[in-house]
Amino acid sequence: MDREFDLIVIGTGAAGSPVAHKCRAAGWDVAIIDSRAFGGTCALRGCDPKKVLVGVADVIDESRQMRGKGVAGGDPEIDWHALMQFKASFTDPVPQSRQTGYEKIGIKTFHGHARFVAPRKLQIGDQVISGRYIHIAAGARPATLGVSGEEYLTTSEQFLELDRLPQRIVFVGGGYISFEFAHVAARAGAEVRIFHRGNQSLEKVDPDLVGELVKATAAAGIDVRLNAPVKSIARVNGHLQVQVSVEAGEESFAADLVVHGAGRVPDLDDLDLPAARIEREKQGVSVNEYLQSISNPAVYAAGDAAASGGPPLTPIASMEAQIVAANILEGNNRRPNYTEVPSVVFTLPPLAAVGLREEDARKQGLEFKTNYADTSKWYSSRRLGLEHSGFKVLIEEGTGRILGAHLLGTHAEETINLFAVAIRAGLKADDLREMIYAYPTSASDIVCMLN
């Protein structure tokens, strides 16, 4: 006989776990399923372990930048094996901790691949379970590229598990994953190339600051090629041969590792959504403004699994999970708001953004002024030997509202949060100018950015 639950959650990451916890706290009978180790992408295969690697690379980078400015001695190096062990100290405890946490509060756990067999029924192995509600938070997977030799690609997850870092590394695609891992690999001594099919890498980020980041990337010894789609990958004489289309025709590059950094897609194909009458699109499950399936009202979706219009970021997944939990428990009453979401490319230096780009503001017909400057000669950059930094802030004419902020430089990943608070709270440029900041800090530069 089928086991029945009030709620079944597919996925144990940021978009799924909070829904299970909230509904269980309300007294509901809850089940949660994952085909992989419990914990989700961010904790196990994404943000958290990546930032551990970036942190060590940052130490190496700052030490090298300050060479001759007070730092002496031998050139510091990354011990890759020790770094992987340090990273594992964060990730290894997570699955058991999550499992224990679920069981302690009475959430039923299932390990295995789930697929729908009816609108409110799922099969996991030889078990069939049904739910009054089902929440899909299945995350994302690397996109299929259709490139000959695609089977030779290494995923970002596999990169985070490398026991040894190969010498010659090619990254396919010029997005977050490629740039972040390329900066780490270069500081670890690898010869690194990035091939991107478009004419701008990091396509959703301010192009001027991306251009400055590309200069910093080149200065780190990383070869970035634009308008250079990878055509094929082959194994030849013990190494990988990458065929790339370039302006002059085609060029071949030898590599020991080729990493997939060309985008991710919702991991929904194995769920058999048609069996549950769940409509989907390229971006995920088709949902309404309440994150409820437009075709099956018993189903909700969040994070990378939902075509919600929100950016694919962990804080968005967490926010959407809270909204789904509220709407399931109380009836549809909450909607997501994506207008003030800060994001960071964790390169060296980091590139951070919140709010509108100039292009977006113009499309909306807004009247604004742009404050834009290279800050490499500012005190905050010079004291750390940082040669590539800058900012761009959009301020609405008449109202003084801050429409967007884009930062490249030391502590940009922290300073951007102040701009995010200002935009969400409706603060004006004058409000931030009049603020008294601790000095000297990266945040105290905000006053100069708004003049």
Image (tube, rainbow, N blue to C red):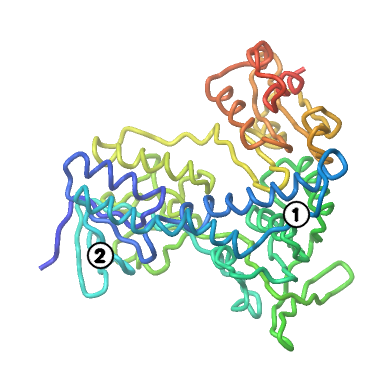
> In this view, which residue lies farthest toward the left?
1
Counting from the top left corner in percent of width and height, residue 136 is at 35, 54
Q: Crowding at label 2, few (<14), some or many (≥20) Cα neighbours within 10 Å? A: many
Mark carried by residue 122: 2
Between 75 and 32, the residue placed more toward the observer is 75
Q: Earlier in the sequence, mark 1 or mark 2?
A: 1
- Whether residue 179 sits left or right of residue 317 in the image: it is right
Q: Residue at x 84, y 52 (%)?
A: 219
Q: Residue at x 69, y 78 (%)?
A: 233
- Whether residue 117 sits left or right of residue 378 in the image: it is left
Between 49 and 308, the residue placed more toward the observer is 49
Counting from the top left corner in percent of width and height, residue 372 is at 80, 29
Vertical position of residue 237 compared to residue 245: above or below: below
Q: Secondary structure at mark 1?
A: loop
Q: Is residue 378 visible?
A: yes
Q: Which quadrant of the figure contains the N terminus?
A: bottom left
- Whether residue 275 sits left or right of residue 395 in the image: it is left
Q: Crowding at label 1, few (<14), some or many (≥20) Cα neighbours within 10 Å? A: few
On the image, numbered disc 1 is attached to which residue? 76
Mark carried by residue 172: none
Work out how far the residue at label 1 is from the one at label 2, CA to CA, in angstroms.
Answer: 53 Å
Q: Which quadrant of the figure contains the C terminus?
A: top right
Q: Residue at x 71, y 76 (%)?
A: 256
